[in-house]
C-alpha cells in the first residue's frame, strides 16, 4: 500500500483508484462480462460470478489491489466471494445505507492501525467495466464512518428510497468511477446505492470480497461454491480462497505479484 493510499483509506474508509485496468485488461473483461450477460441464467450455476472467465478470476489477484489486500488483512487474506453486478434503471428503489457494523454487530469487524499499517478484517473491491457519470446514481458512501464508535441513528442521512434524484446530505459522497477504475471499501464504511437513472446504459462491475483467512461469517449452502466451480480455478486462486490458521503463511502471500497466466 502506498503512503498516499494508506492516508486516504484511513481518512475516508475507501479508496477510489483510477485507471487500474490496462486497455487490454479492460477489453478482455468487458467482453467476458458481455458474454456472461448473454448466457441464460440456468447455465450459470452460481449466477454471474468471477469464475465465468479467467480474465475476471485474475482480478482477485490484480497487481494494483494485491498489496492493499495483503496489508489490510495482515498478510492473511481469504477471498470468499465474487459476484458480477449488472444494474439497470429497472430497479426502482435505492439500496439503503448499510455496513457490517450495523448488519452484523460491532464485535464482528475490526479496523485498526498498528506499526504504521492498517488492518481491516472485511474489505470489498469493486472493479468497474462501465462508466458512471455525475447524476447517474450508483454507489454512495459516508466517508470516515469506518471509524465510528456509535451506532448511526436510524434513518440518519437516508434519502427517500424511491426518489431517483434525491438531495444528498453534504456528508454523503456519490462515487463516480470510470470503466477500469477500482473502489476498495472497508465493510465498516457506511454505504448505499442510488437508483440507476440512465435508460441507455447499465452499471457493470465485479464485487470481490476479502476477509482474513481465519474468519468465517457466512453460514449455509448459498455461500459454498460447487466443486465444479472450484476445480476450474487456478491453484493460486484456490489457495487465496482457502481458510488457514492465524499463523499459517500462504505461499501466494510471499509473492509481490501473482500471474494466473
Ligand atoms: O452496488 C454497489 O455499488 C454496492 C454494493 C453493496 O452495497 C455491497 O456489496 O455491500
Image (cartoon, rainbow, N blue to C red):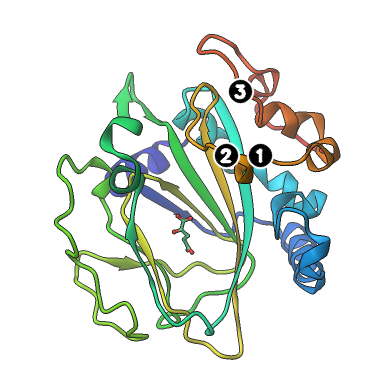
Q: Which of the two labelled residues, at mark 3 and mark 1, occupies the earlier sequence position?
A: 1
- Report the mark closest to the observer, 3 or 1: 1
Q: Position of residue 109 (x, y in %)?
A: 35, 34
Q: Secondary structure at mark 3?
A: loop
Q: CA distance from mark 1 to mark 2?
A: 7 Å
Residue of label 2:
220
Q: Is residue 56 visible?
A: yes
| Residue on which the image places disc 1 | 224
Q: Is residue 168 left or right of residue 223?
A: left
Question: Position of 189 compared to 220: left or right?
Answer: left
Quadrant occupied by the C terminus: top right
- Considering the numbered disc 1 on the image, is that residue within a helix, a strand or a loop? loop
At x 75%, y 71%, the residue is 37
Around disc 3, counting alpha carbons within 10 Å, would you say few (fewer than 14), some (14 to 19), or many (20 or more)? many
Decide: is 88 above or below 152: below
Above or below: residue 177 compared with residue 230: below
Q: Position of residue 75 (x, y in %)?
A: 53, 22
Q: Which residue is mark 3?
A: 243
Contact, CB < 8 Å: mark 1 with mark 2? yes
> Could you say which is closer to the camera, residue 253 or residue 108?
108
* Total numbered badges shown on the rendered structure: 3
Task: Give the quarter of the image for residue 188.
Answer: top left
Q: Residue at x 18, y 53 (%)?
A: 152
Amino acid at each position: 500500500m502506498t503512503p498516499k493510499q494508506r492516508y486516504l483509506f484511513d481518512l475516508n474508509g475507501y479508496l477510489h483508484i483510477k485507471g487500474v485496468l490496462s486497455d487490454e485488461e479492460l477489453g478482455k473483461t468487458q467482453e467476458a462480462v458481455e458474454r456472461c450477460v448473454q448466457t441464460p441464467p440456468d447455465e450459470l450455476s452460481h449466477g454471474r460470478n468471477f469464475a465465468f472467465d479467467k480474465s475476471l478470476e485474475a482480478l482477485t489477484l490484480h497487481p494494483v489491489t494485491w498489496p492493499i489486500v495483503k496489508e489490510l488483512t495482515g498478510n492473511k487474506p481469504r477471498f470468499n466471494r465474487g459476484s458480477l453486478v449488472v444494474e439497470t434503471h429497472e430497479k426502482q428503489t435505492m439500496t439503503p445505507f448499510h455496513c457490517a457494523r450495523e448488519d452484523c454487530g460491532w464485535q464482528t469487524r475490526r479496523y485498526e492501525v498498528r506499526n504504521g499499517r492498517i488492518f481491516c478484517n472485511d474489505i470489498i473491491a469493486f472493479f468497474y467495466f462501465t462508466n458512471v457519470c455525475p447524476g447517474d446514481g450508483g454507489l454512495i458512501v459516508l466517508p470516515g464512518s469506518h471509524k465510528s464508535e456509535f451506532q448511526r441513528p436510524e434513518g440518519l442521512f437516508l434519502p427517500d428510497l424511491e426518489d431517483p434524484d434525491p438531495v444528498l446530505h453534504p456528508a454523503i459522497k456519490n462515487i463516480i468511477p470510470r470503466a477500469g477504475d477500482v473502489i476498495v471499501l472497508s465493510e465498516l464504511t457506511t454505504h448505499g446505492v442510488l437508483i440507476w437513472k440512465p435508460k441507455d446504459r447499465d452499471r457493470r462491475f465485479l464485487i470481490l470480497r476479502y476477509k482474513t483467512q481465519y474468519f468465517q461469517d457466512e453460514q449455509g449452502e448459498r455461500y459454498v461454491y460447487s466443486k465444479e466451480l472450484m476445480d476450474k480455478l487456478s491453484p493460486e486462486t484456490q489457495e487465496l480462497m482457502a481458510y488457514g490458521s492465524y499463523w499459517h503463511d500462504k505461499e501466494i502471500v510471499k509473492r509481490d505479484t501473482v500471474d494466473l497466466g
